Amino acid sequence: MTRDEIKTKVIDCLATTGCDTDYLPEGELLPNLGVDSLMKALWVVELERRFSVRMPIEKLKALGTLGDVIATIESLVGLLK
Amino acid sequence: MMPDFIAKKKPAIILAEESVGFDELHARVADAVAGLKADRTRLLPLMAEKSIDFAVRFLASLEAGQPIAIFSSEWSAEERVAREKLITGSCPDPKTAIVLFTSGTGGIPKAVQLTAEGIKANSQAVIQSLRFRETDSQHLFLPLSYSFGLLGQLLPAIQIGMTTTLYSDFLAIKPAFDSGSIGGVVSGVPSHLGTLIRMFGSVGPFENVTHVVSAGARLEPELKRKLQALFPKAILFNNYGQTEASPRILSMASDDPKFFDDVTGYPVEGIVAKMGREDELIVTGPQIMSGYLGDSMGTALRVRDGWLHTGDRASMDETGLVTILGRMDDLVKIGGERVSPLELERVAENAGWASQVCALPVEDPLYGTRFVLFLGAVSPAAPADSVLFEVLRKTLSAAKVPGKIIRMDELPRNSNGKFDRTKLREKLKAPR
């Protein structure tokens, strides 16, 4: 799976939480993009389901930006290979 | 002074990277009290953090009689400045122990002064109504700048000798659910509890959870039933409160035969409730605030002859069971926070994006309620929606930011010239 494919799927997952996904610069902090704690929680669950991964607590804490989420999924999917 | 019934070595507070036992917590509080020269004429600002240091400072201030004002790191710079202004230059009431901030009507925040007597009465009421003596631990992710988290859950737990595991935020509790190690008391606003069901409905049930506590907004009957399925061994507690009442006012447990109906609860210990004019719920008791700091007019509107006028319409049956029916003003509850559409509308108006602005609360599957911002006669210079959202998110707390922005040539008006909210709602239903 390419990084662009991961990014598309990550944003698809976020859309299921009700977040407006039209404007999502990768480096912006998630709260500034309207992703609050409830959305983030639902997002993580959807990511885990669709990518068949489990995010450990230290990964959850590090999810500050969309870029962090993509990088985390990349590393977890990579670990599964 | 630590009561004898509390096990000294038992953990009082557990965080991800540190914990403290009751004996050490009480020793640290005693040290802090000894080093604190209480000055009842000034408020000490205290940033609410999920840390043992915050708990020590908070408890020491209470014990030493040093009035404190609780701040939140989640506020925007503008929100923090507005609150700092409220406490600058105003001398707190002699009985004030804590100042907590609420959004207030019209988007103007209020500094609620609570007394030591009221806080103590609230703790006793919480311990009794939530049956804290029947459990020995709780998991708490609610912010500690919020009366529900700080005075409604953390303080009573410390006073009764319960262990509290503090989580930095809502998501941080996920691993505890994933591992099945969650037990004791879990508390949240209905949006949190609904999200737990969406997250773990297929993973549960969680049989070690003994108490599920809801407050901050209406808990719908369907959500009550889903919660009972996810936590089959737990007693559910539906609560209603206001910061101005320290905060708990009504409570009800799921072993009451009427719990799963659309009802709210019974007055807690210390609170007397009755119906005022136009079916407004009014309450009295030691828990009621001493007043809003620097706002005697606002205080006089809310507290009359010792009775707090809640601003909520309600009904009460012959057994004293109260059902909250809604607000008497335009305020709405979003994610547990009472917010006014006026604040959002003012930000949009002041930004000059449109000459017609209307924020409408609509049902939302995640938050219960959320604003939609309608803009009419939009300025040609108004930036794209993504930029509008960016500005709103930097200016307002999350609950006040709309879920959607809709631009129209002209906002519809009724015969009085006011924006026609019915037609705006129809616009939401129409295919776009």
Image (spheres, coloured by chain):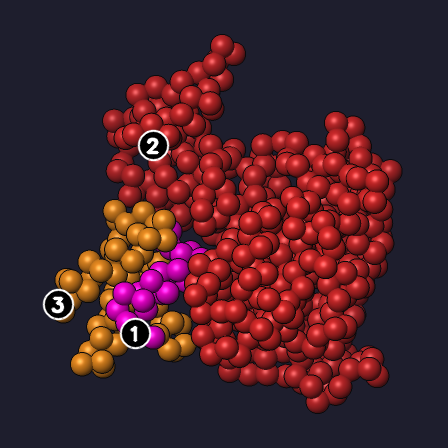
Q: Quadrant of the N terminus of chain B?
A: bottom right
Tell me the SS state at disc 1: loop
Q: Tell me whether the residue at label 1 lies in contact with that at label 2, contact meaning CB atoms closer than 8 angstroms.
A: no
Residue depth check, mark 1 versus mark 2: number of the one nearer the observer: 1
**Residue at 72% of width from left, 37% of height from top?**
B314
**Marks 1/3 same chain:** yes
Tell me the SS state at disc 2: strand
The relative height of residue B341 versus residue B234 in the rendered view (above or below) is above
On whether residue A32 falls in the magenta region, the answer is yes
The relative height of residue A58 versus residue B300 in the rendered view (above or below) is below
Residue B230: x and y in percent read 54, 64
Residue type (three-letter) at the residue carrying disc 1? Val
The tag on residue A53 is 1
Residue type (three-letter) at the residue carrying disc 2? Ile
Residue B195: x and y in percent read 47, 58
In this rendering, does residue B94 appear at all?
no
> Label 3 crowding class (10 Å Cα cut-off): few <14, some 14-19, many 20+?
few
> Label 2 crowding class (10 Å Cα cut-off): few <14, some 14-19, many 20+?
few
Q: Colour of chain B?
A: red
Q: Mark 2 points at which residue?
A: B406
**Residue at 60% of width from left, 75% of height from top?**
B208
Segment colored magenta: A31-54
Question: Along the horizontal axis of the image, is B323 left or right of B270?
Answer: left
The chain drawn in orange is: A
Name the main secondary structure of what is drawn in magenta: helix
**Residue at 52% of width from left, 12% of height from top?**
B416
The relative height of residue B207 versus residue B261 in the rendered view (above or below) is below
**Marks 1/2 same chain:** no
Give the distance between the C-alpha atoms of the residues marked 1 and 2, in whole angstroms: 37 Å
Question: Along the horizontal axis of the image, is B123 left or right of A70?
Answer: right
